[in-house]
Amino acid sequence: MPQNLLDFDLQGLTAWFTELGEKPFRAKQVFHWIHQSGVADFAQMTDIAKSLREKLQQQAVVQTPAINYAHTSSDGTRKWLFDVGVANGIETVFIPEDDRGTLCVSSQVGCALECTFCSTGRQGFNRNLSVAEIIGQVWVANHSLRGEVNRTSGESAERPVTNVVMMGMGEPLANLDNVVTALGIMLDDHAYGLSRRRVTVSTSGLVPAMDRLAERCPVALAVSLHAPNDALRDQIVPINKKYPLRELMAACQRYLVHAPRDFITFEYVMLAGVNDQPEHARQLIELTREVPCKFNLIPFNPFPDSGYEKPRTDTMRVFREILQDAGYVVTTRKTRGDDIDAACGQLAGKVADKSGRVMKRMNREAA
Ligand code: SAH
Ligand code: SF4
């Protein structure tokens, strides 16, 4: 089997080149070709000696997951459905805006954590994505969008992906090793060169893995809170039984010591009649008193047989105002991109043709 070079960060590629008997600077050159120039064909790597190019052709590939389809919505949102050999595949979504382009990246096929309002969670867990499958999503997006003219700004970008949010399918911190390596490639100046502030990991609250992320690759952190007390969170985010809110809040505080931003973003999916009442907002204020944070309110995105409903607009407004009056910065997702409407938590499968709305919100926030 040829080695897929997308599985390597620069250190790994250098080690592999050394095994081949090649000098480290050759690895750096090839790394540039792959990630900065978006070249997958060794024959096109013109400053590499022909003998090495031939060796690479025999022993290596640069292989992203196969694209099942690519789709552009009327508002310019782009998405790709990738074939990863199992289940419904994974989806990646790109939202272009004037001053940035945000890519929502998946980390697993399915998810084992079974949050009750999430269609990925309902599908169950299939497998972790490899480093090549994670960074391959970034490679494909940059490769396909490079040179395209931005619909609003009228400019074309050499590196269209300026921000990444790990908010696609799966729980990134349950696939920590591969996610950390892929994040490292996103941040590496020899590859995508994104700043830590422009890369966000979203987690449902795997406390030990949050600490490890802080040590190994502290990028911006979003925590899927969704409930202000343990009794409720136990029901809708079952991992809460293992890592209850007190531990989660302490982990957020620890994370902030290393984080590139001085706040945690709390995501809060509003489920009508479940967690959207004024008393829940007041409990949130108590809960997060010691944690510098912002709130992102997401109206529930319905899917068949979910058992939940979207909140009313005025309910959301009251909830938001309680938080704002207490001094919190609160963003609320707007309804845009209706033709491919959906949340990153419910990509692929029956709801594959969805994804715009949450990304608008995430994109604004990750600026
Ligand atoms: N597993 C990670 C990241 C993927 S989910 C996490 O849970 O944070 C990305 C975001 O979409 C999470 O905040 C998740 O709770 C939210 N989400 C999932 N299902 C949703 C739905 N049906 N409607 C709105 N948001 C949803
Ligand atoms: Fe998994 Fe996140 Fe969905 Fe929960 S919300 S089931 S952690 S993908």
Image: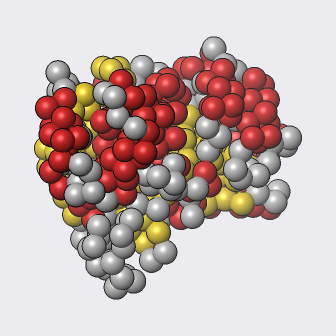
Q: Does 224 sit above or below residue 320? A: above
**Nearer to the camera, 197 or 38:** 38
Relative placement, left or right, of 346 versus 321 is left
Residue plotted at (51% across, 41% down): 184
Task: Please state, as top left, top right, bottom left or bottom right, where the C terminus lies in the image.
Answer: bottom right
Residue plotted at (43% across, 39% down): 24
**Nearer to the camera, 4 or 125:** 4
Q: Does 112 sit above or below residue 96? A: above
Q: Does 336 sit above or below residue 1? A: below
Does residue 211 show up?
Answer: yes
Residue plotted at (47% across, 52% down): 190
Which percent across, then down, holds residue 146? Answer: 29, 67
Which percent across, then down, holds residue 277? Answer: 65, 45
Task: Please state, as top left, top right, bottom left or bottom right, where the N terminus lies in the image.
Answer: top left
Picture quadrant where residue 287 is located = top right
Relative placement, left or right, of 325 versus 191 is right
Picture quadrant where residue 151 is located = bottom left
Residue plotted at (27% across, 65% down): 145
**Nearer to the camera, 161 or 297:** 161
Which percent across, then down, holds residue 36? Answer: 37, 57
